[in-house]
Image (spheres, rainbow, N blue to C red):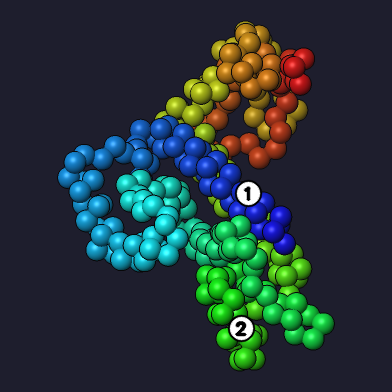
Amino acid sequence: METVYSRLSSALDVFESLCFTLWRVLCGCQNRVPAGTAKLDANQIHGRVDKFIAERYSKAFDKYERTGQALNIPLHSLRETLEEAFQGVVPFKAYSNHSGSIRQLRNAIIHDVRLGRVQMGEKTLVPKPASASKYRSWSAVHQASAFPRQMQSDFVEPQPQAATDFSQTAELLNTLYGHLLSAFQNEFWATERSSLREMFQLEFGNPADNPLPALQTSGSPLAVSNKQSSWASRLGVSLTAQAVLIDLQAGSNPPSDTTAVSGDVLRPSPSL
């Protein structure tokens, strides 16, 4: 159980760091600063400190008295950026609740001597992730064991709960990552901006203007030239196209199927 929740928590950290980076790239293409990433001036810093003192200092000081853990005032928060990236995305609220409960249980497992548990007949029960913060002491676990309804709502067998949390984590991560991929796809095909396409040395154009003949079997034709791209080399991929010219009518949707190209467009480099 300890290994499962430690790795689930690490997976959440990696996912959020990836989303933070991708959202900054997307906002950069749109010439705007992502929420939570702008450098603060003195007045903004004082405002955030005052807000922390008013809303969170008392609880943080209580924790400091119990554990000796230093107080940290968060001037910048990854959460601000994620909330902007997934604004209006319904599963993000479920992700926030789920990730918070996973981290609560992980902290209890890592920092406590042993996670509190109750033996009920042949079953061993542990706190559910969402309830872990309430049962960080053995006395709290012992008191709960005297109330069957409380045990039923707050405790569970560890193996089924771990399997459920693993599946739910995978489902939520895939859903949210799919949202980011859709946002990048929309940005790629945006006619009012070309920043994302320029990162990959791609441009819209007319295949007839390209000196290489384009082989078309379905969808829109692509025409390529033979100059290697430096960005692709750094990624370990050899690209023999300096520009991909896509014939699109104004307002048309991108091709839904794979378009045939003239020549070898992408091939693995020897380093792979």
Residue 270's disc number: none
- In the picture, measured across the screen, residue 87 lies left or right of residue 227, that is left
The residue sitting at 63% across, 49% down in the picture is 11
Who is closer to the viewer here, 71 or 149? 71
The residue labelled by disc 2 is: 142
Residue 154 x %, y %: 61, 80
- Residue at 67%, 13% in the rendered image: 240
Query: Residue shown at 22%/56% (left/top)?
Result: 50
For the residues carrying marks 2 and 1, which lies nearer the camera in this image? Answer: 2
Q: Is residue 150 above or below residue 88?
A: below
Vertical placement of residue 155 versus 101, above or below: below
x and y, in percent, of residue 87 in the image: 43, 55
Q: What is the x, y in percent for residue 228?
A: 63, 11
Q: From the viewer's perspective, is 254 left or right of 158?
A: left
Q: Amino acid at mark 2?
A: His
Quarter location, residue 156: bottom right
Give the quadrant of the N terminus.
Answer: bottom right
Q: Which residue is mark 1?
A: 11
Q: Secondary structure at mark 2?
A: helix
**Residue at horizontal 19 percent and vertical 41 percent from the top:** 42
Measure the C-alpha gap from mark 2 to mark 1: 32 Å
Mark 1 secondary-structure assignment = helix
Quarter of the image where one finds residue 101: bottom right
